[in-house]
Image (tube, grey):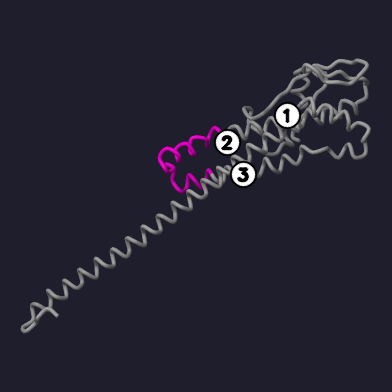
Amino acid sequence: YGCVVFWGLEPEEEKFFLDVIHPFEEDSLSEEAQERDDMNFLYGSKTRLYNDQICLATSSPLEKLSISFALAQSTKLSALELRVEETFESTRLHPQELADTGHISLSQTEVSKLIGHLFIVNSSVNLESDMLSCPEFFWENDEWEPLFRHAGKYLEIDHRVTVLNKRMEVLDGMFKMLKDQLEVRHATRLELIVIWLICSEVAMQLIWNILIKDILGFFPGGNGD
């Protein structure tokens, strides 16, 4: 998921491991786009999550790993939510402007860039959302899957994915609206060019006819026909 989960390490130790894996990162997020979640953990008689605390029933690393998958998914989802929220904030004024004025005060290039940005966000969210399904680890370790499901339920992963998809539907509608607006603007521009060409041709024909009559009028016996 592009996430790292630490259990019981000091900040200096976490930074050491992050520095070790940093050279292997691809398409790293900016510091502003990075997400960090912190929870306390302890040991007890039953595994459960409550009040931002994790109670572990055993010292098995597989128990921690099962919960770590859910924590990583939740953090990944937070990064996607932030990306979609930023896209909403950067584009929400354009539909309002279209409703108030009937047009968008953006050039064709700017609208094309905006459409491309929306498409990239849409594609990345849809592709990365597929990662929020059950990890392959539980295919051969199905006894730990209920714990993973329990952690995911506490972190409201399914509900947040549903909300994220609905927001993406709104963004997709905005994408289509901007695309339609661009096509209408382009079609209108072509119509104006055609009208201008027709008017120019008529004007030139009139001027040519007037010039012909004036020229013929200079000749003896000319009647201007």
Residue labelled with disc 2: 87
Judged from this view, the residue extending furthest toward the front is 99
* Quarter that holds the N terminus: top right
CA separation, marks 3 and 2? 11 Å
Q: Quadrant of residue 193?
A: bottom left
Q: Residue at x 63, y 36 (%)?
A: 167
Residue occupying image coordinates x 75% and y 33%: 158
Residue count near mark 1 (Cα–Cα under 10 Å), binned few <14, some 14–19, many ≥20 = many
Q: Circle 3: is it few (<14), some (14-19), or many (20+) Cα within 10 Å?
A: few
Tag of residue 61: none
Residue that carries the numbered disc 3 in the rendered image: 120
State the SS at label 3.
helix
Crowd tier of the residue under label 2, counting other residues whose Cα lies within 10 Å: few below 14, some 14–19, many 20 or above:
some
Q: What's the residue type where badge 2 is placed?
A: Thr
Is 110 magenta? The answer is: yes
Q: Is 153 rendered above or below residue 43?
A: below
Disc 1 element: helix
Region of the chain picked out in magenta, as a range: 87-114
